[in-house]
């Protein structure tokens, strides 16, 4: 298999992964914001994470992966949810602040940093830039899980890649009223 070239890594970062991450950040934020402030402890089953814990897992993992690119290695030390994050509003603020700061730093990575082989728990050894694809899939997967929590909590599912039933109903109500 051919090694990824520096110009390819730069294209992936600036032309594919950062625009993709920013778009998915917008969607993930809307799903987290939809969690009712008093329902963050909702879980569909006893073995499931609570809504707020699942949302934290999504955003903390994104930060961990972006940090790995910046550092050239993964830090797997625990990242518990800060005590200051008590509801979905607190979490979206934290997510936006931390996401934007890391994205800005990612734009400054050199080609050498992007193509550096980084180990992930002995399972994967990939060029650093490729982990952004990995985390995109991870976030989308868990965001899908989180979106399934919303209606049972009494919340509305936001539009993601087009209208959701709830966003379409809101649009129709606005049009009719």
Image (cartoon, rainbow, N blue to C red):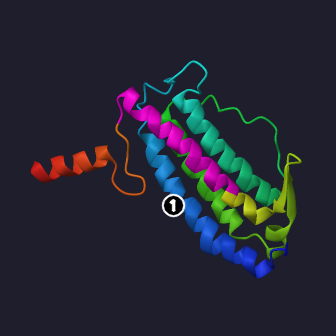
Q: Which residue is located at x 64 percent, y 61 percent?
A: 103
Residue 84 vertical position relative to residue 14 in the rendered view, above or below:
above
Q: Which residue is located at x 72 percent, y 76 percent?
A: 10
The answer to whether residue 54 is visible is: yes
- Residue 48, percent from left and from top: 58, 25
Q: Which residue is located at x 69 percent, y 59 percent?
A: 132
- Residue 61, percent from left and from top: 68, 45
Residue 1 vertical position relative to residue 154 in the rendered view, above or below:
below
Q: Which residue is at the front of the view, 146 or 14?
A: 146
Secondary structure, mark 1, is: helix
Residue farthest to the left?
177
Left or right: residue 23 compared with residue 121? left
The answer to whether residue 85 is visible is: no
Residue placed under numbered mark 1 in the picture? 23
- Residue 76, percent from left and from top: 82, 41
Prevailing secondary structure of the magenta residues: helix
The magenta stretch is 134-155
Residue farthest to the bottom?
7
């Amino acid at each position: 298999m051919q090694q990824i070239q520096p110009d390819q890594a730069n294209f992936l970062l600036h032309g594919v992964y950062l625009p993709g991450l920013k778009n998915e950040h917008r969607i993930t934020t809307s799903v987290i914001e939809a969690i009712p402030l008093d329902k963050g402890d909702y879980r569909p089953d006893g073995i499931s994470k609570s809504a707020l814990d699942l949302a934290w897992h999504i955003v903390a993992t994104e930060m961990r992966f972006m940090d790995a690119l910046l550092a050239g290695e993964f830090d797997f030390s625990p990242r518990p949810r800060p005590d200051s994050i008590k509801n979905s509003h607190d979490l979206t603020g934290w997510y936006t602040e931390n996401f934007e700061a890391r994205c800005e730093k990612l734009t400054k990575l050199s080609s050498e940093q992007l193509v550096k082989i980084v180990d992930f728990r002995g399972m994967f050894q990939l060029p650093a830039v490729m982990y952004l694809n990995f985390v995109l899939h991870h976030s989308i997967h868990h965001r899908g899980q989180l979106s399934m929590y919303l209606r049972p909590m009494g919340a509305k599912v936001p539009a993601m890649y087009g209208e959701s039933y709830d966003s379409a109903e809101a649009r129709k109500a606005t049009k009719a009223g």
